[in-house]
Image (cartoon, rainbow, N blue to C red):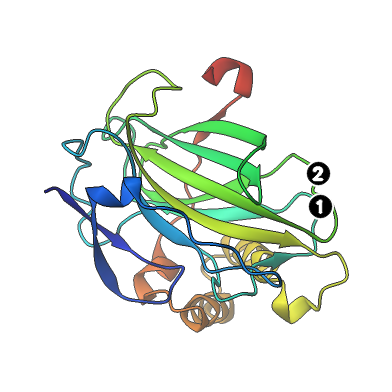
Amino acid sequence: MFRLLVFLTIFGLSWINIPSSIAQSPEPASPDTGTPEGQQGVGGTRPETRCPDAEGKPLTVLVQGRGQDITREENPVIWVYVPYAAGKIGYLEFSLHDRPVTQTFYRTAIEVADSPGLVKIPIPYSLTPNTTYRWYVKLYCQSHQPGDNTKYYYLQNWMQYRPDAPTETSWYDRIAQMGDRYFADPDNPQLQAEWQDLLASIGLPEWISQVPLAHPRFVPPDESK
């Protein structure tokens, strides 16, 4: 059985092996309050699908993942480390859904940049206050037509939009704001230390604070169908 080695940022663990059978596993029930912990796994029906070796730096989402995945922003940003360059894999896909995943509010394909790096995924859909959403980042390891849901791996997590939430609990915003400050002046030692400390505080390894910012192409929904 093929196993994908993935860094589980959302649970704060180090490394785990994800069996392909998780694609058939039921989703966990979400709690009545707060945001549930996120998950990752294998999607689709072709376990023989293989991604290139990520050399110890796998697909990673920058989230707090312990019940405080909150944003104060109506149009927040999610940060993802993509370990592949253009031509090495197919593409990424981001989608935003309601809590039970019965509606899709936003979906975009992401063409991988020329080199690995952190990708900022803006959400143009205006969130509804005091509402919890579920999102997915799907990695299609082989080139194929968008909409073919048979060959992907995914990361998922929750996002709750609370405009009046305390700043210290709004982790999506803290990561996005600190990331913007750091990449505006990446040679600044103080900003380097603050960026590293913030990511370390949510259980991410040191290397994630040292990777560059990537600039992929976001494919409009009408082009990705």
Q: Quadrant of the C terminus?
A: top right
Q: Is residue 177 above or below residue 88?
A: below
x 65%, y 64%: residue: 172
| Residue 222: quarter of image | top right
Is any part of residue 101 visible from this angle? yes
Q: Position of residue 183 (x, y in %)?
A: 57, 60
53 relative to 185 in the view: left or right: left
Q: Residues within 10 Å of mark 2 (few under 14, many from 20)?
A: few
Q: Secondary structure at mark 1?
A: loop
The circle on residue 96 is: none
Q: Is residue 67 above or below residue 60?
A: below
Q: Where is mark 2, residue-wise? A: 126
Is any part of residue 61 visible from this angle? no
Q: Is residue 225 above or below residue 214?
A: above
x 72%, y 81%: residue: 168
Residue situated in front as seen by the camera: 219 or 67: 67
Q: Position of residue 200 (x, y in %)?
A: 46, 80
Residue situated in front as seen by the camera: 47 or 13: 47
x 69%, y 69%: residue: 32
The answer to whether the residues at label 1 and label 2 have Cβ atoms under 8 Å apart is yes
Residue situated in front as seen by the camera: 33 or 88: 33
| The residue positioned farthest toward the left in the image shown | 1
Q: Position of residue 220 (x, y in %)?
A: 61, 24
| Residue 105: quarter of image | top right
Q: Position of residue 174 (x, y in %)?
A: 67, 71
**Looking at the picture, which amino acid does disc 2 mark?**
Ser
Give the Cα distance between marks 1 and 2.
5 Å
Q: Residues within 10 Å of mark 1 (few under 14, many from 20)?
A: some
The circle on residue 74 is: 1
**Looking at the picture, which amino acid does disc 1 mark?**
Glu
x 57%, y 32%: residue: 108
Q: Is residue 219 above or below residue 51?
A: above
